[in-house]
Image (cartoon, rainbow, N blue to C red):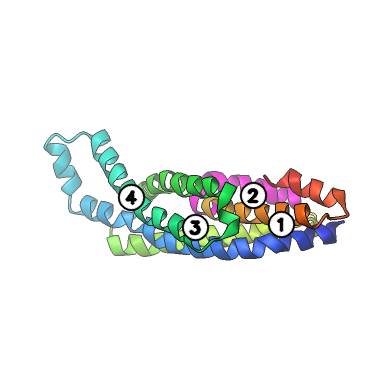
Amino acid sequence: PDEQINDIQKLGVVGGFQIASTVTFGYSFLIASFTLFLIKERISNAKHMQYLTGAQPVLFWLSNLVWDLINYLIPAFICVILIVAFGIDNYTGNQLKYIIGLFLLYGFAHIPQTYLISYLFQSSSTGFAINVAWNILSSQIPIVGVYFLQLPALGLTNEGDILEWIFLIFLPNFAFGQGLTDVYTNYEYNNYCGKNNVSSEFTCEYLSLIHI
């Protein structure tokens, strides 16, 4: 029944959303900080000077990407260590490899997008502030919206699934937060169905179809 499915969904989504919301909020500032140097370099024509002295555009952007990824991976590595140190069962054990993958892929997905967004600003401080606000809004609001739309009781599951796929393609911050929420929630679902011997087989079969 739909009521039982909704009750089980609440077990994991609340905790998963809290963690995902906190992590994506902090990373909104980290990712936005990569625009500061790029905007200053473009406004001061430092990048143009490098081109004039023979620097290849491919090497210029590749070196920036590698350096920013190194600076990104350090706090990402620290976050993974903290997850293991605090013993968050939902993210350790078999789930740890998914968490590591999420942190790695998030950097590769969001940093290049930040490079593109940096061209919209002529002030580094303005660019940083707007980027932070955009990163926060593009993670918190879509995650909440998709969650409620996917509740069977509302009858809007298909619409929620469509929006989720659209957001996953265009919003790296949403994909990161949704991934953290899904890993947390899936652990709760598997734990609930495995240990409590839920009488309704339909409920657990339904959950196994919509979650990994």
Please report whichever mark, 3 or 4, sits nearer to the chain's N-terminal start. 3
Instruction: Determine which residue is flagged by label 2.
Output: 163
Comparing labels 3 and 2, the label whose residue is closer to the camera: 3
Q: Quadrant of residue 10?
A: bottom right
Between the C-alphas of marks 1 and 3, the distance is 32 Å
Please report whichever mark, 2 or 4, sits nearer to the chain's N-terminal start. 4
Q: Tell me, yes or no, whether the two marked residues, 4 and 1, touch with CB atoms within 8 Å.
A: no
Residue at coordinates 71% horizontally, 55% vertically from top-left? 191
Residue at coordinates 48% horizontally, 48% vertically from top-left? 100
Q: Is residue 55 left or right of residue 88?
A: left
Q: Which mark is residue 119?
A: 4
Between the C-alphas of marks 2 and 1, the distance is 9 Å
> Is disc 3 surrounded by few (<14), some (14 to 19) or many (20+) residues within 10 Å?
some
> Is disc 2 surrounded by few (<14), some (14 to 19) or many (20+) residues within 10 Å?
some
Q: Secondary structure at mark 2?
A: helix
- Residue span colored magenta: 157-174
